[in-house]
């Protein structure tokens, strides 16, 4: 059973009225990193996932989840 | 208008990608010259210039550059995605070096390849591959 990481980063970020650049600055990464995480191209490290969750004021499980491709 | 750290990091990352692409072109040209004129690698001045350029590109690949920038911008430029891109680029350079070494090994049975010339070709194509891959990953 193949699993992949899904995220609600785009949804939560836009709910809070943040641009990718603004979120990137809060977390201390490039805007490109935020973009690639949102698009599922890049799987963030635990540290980055936690920083994103903290910046958005959400538990990390509310932002990231495992979904089955089946 | 003053750019924010994120905007500076974005701009500098893009410039770094373009620099990598230009550097790769220079390296490929050097590799071509080395292949066409292996005897030219005995020129000490050319050797010194080659060594300086090679070390510069290797330093860029190893560090990501931006040593003169402020810490926050440099940290954003060298974040997780960029580090992964750099790692992938260096892997590509390694495999190209192996392929070039094997090709030169068998080529030497048919054409005498001076040691210095062979090492120059091998190094140049490997570094060029790494730079091209890094540029591609950073600019896409």
Image (tube, coloured by chain):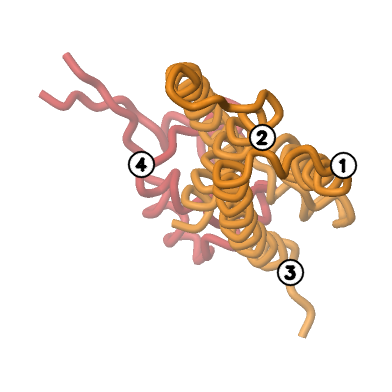
Chain colours: A red, B orange
Dot 3 alpha-carbon crowd within 10 angstroms: few under 14, some 14 to 19, many 20 or more? few
Disc 3 on helix, strand or loop?
A: loop
Q: Mark 1 points at which residue?
A: B44
**Comes first in the chain, label 3 or label 1:** 3
Q: Name the residue under label 4.
A: A40
Q: Nearer the viewer, residue B110 or B13?
A: B110
**Comes first in the chain, label 3 or label 2:** 3
Q: How far apart are marks 3 and 2 (CA)?
A: 42 Å
Q: Residue at x 44, y 33 (%)?
A: A43
Q: Can residue A57 be seen in this view?
A: no
Residue B115 percent location from the top left of the image: 67, 23
Chain of the residue on which disc 2 is drawn = B
Q: Are marks 4 and 3 on the same chain?
A: no
Outermost residue, bottom side: B1
Q: How far apart are marks 2 and 4 (CA)?
A: 40 Å
Left or right of B18, for residue B1? right
Q: Name the residue under label 2.
A: B120
Left or right of B76, for residue B112? left
Chain of the residue on which disc 1 is drawn = B
Q: Nearer the viewer, residue A23 or B132?
A: B132
Residue B53 percent location from the top left of the image: 78, 47
Disc 2 on helix, strand or loop?
A: helix
Q: How far apart are marks 2 and 1 (CA)?
A: 13 Å
Q: Quadrant of the N terminus of chain B?
A: bottom right
């Amino acid at each position: 059973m193949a699993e992949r990481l899904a995220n609600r980063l785009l949804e939560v970020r836009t709910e809070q009225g943040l641009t990718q650049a603004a979120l990137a600055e809060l977390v201390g990464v490039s805007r490109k990193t935020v973009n690639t995480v949102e698009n599922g191209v890049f799987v963030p490290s635990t540290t980055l996932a936690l920083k994103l969750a903290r910046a958005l004021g959400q538990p990390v499980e509310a932002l990231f989840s495992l979904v089955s491709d089946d | 208008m003053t750019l924010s750290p994120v905007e500076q990091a974005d701009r500098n990352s893009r410039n770094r990608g373009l620099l990598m692409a230009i550097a790769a072109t220079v390296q490929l040209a050097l590799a071509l010259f080395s292949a066409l004129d292996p005897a030219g690698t005995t020129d000490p001045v050319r050797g010194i210039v080659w060594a300086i350029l090679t070390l510069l590109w290797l330093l860029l690949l190893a560090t990501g550059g931006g040593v003169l920038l402020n810490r926050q911008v440099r940290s954003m430029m060298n974040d997780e995605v960029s580090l992964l891109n750099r790692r992938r680029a260096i892997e590509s350079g390694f495999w190209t070096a192996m392929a070039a070494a094997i090709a030169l090994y068998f080529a030497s049975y048919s054409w005498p390849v001076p040691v210095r010339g062979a090492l120059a070709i091998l190094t140049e194509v490997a570094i060029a591959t790494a730079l091209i891959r890094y540029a591609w990953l950073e600019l896409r």
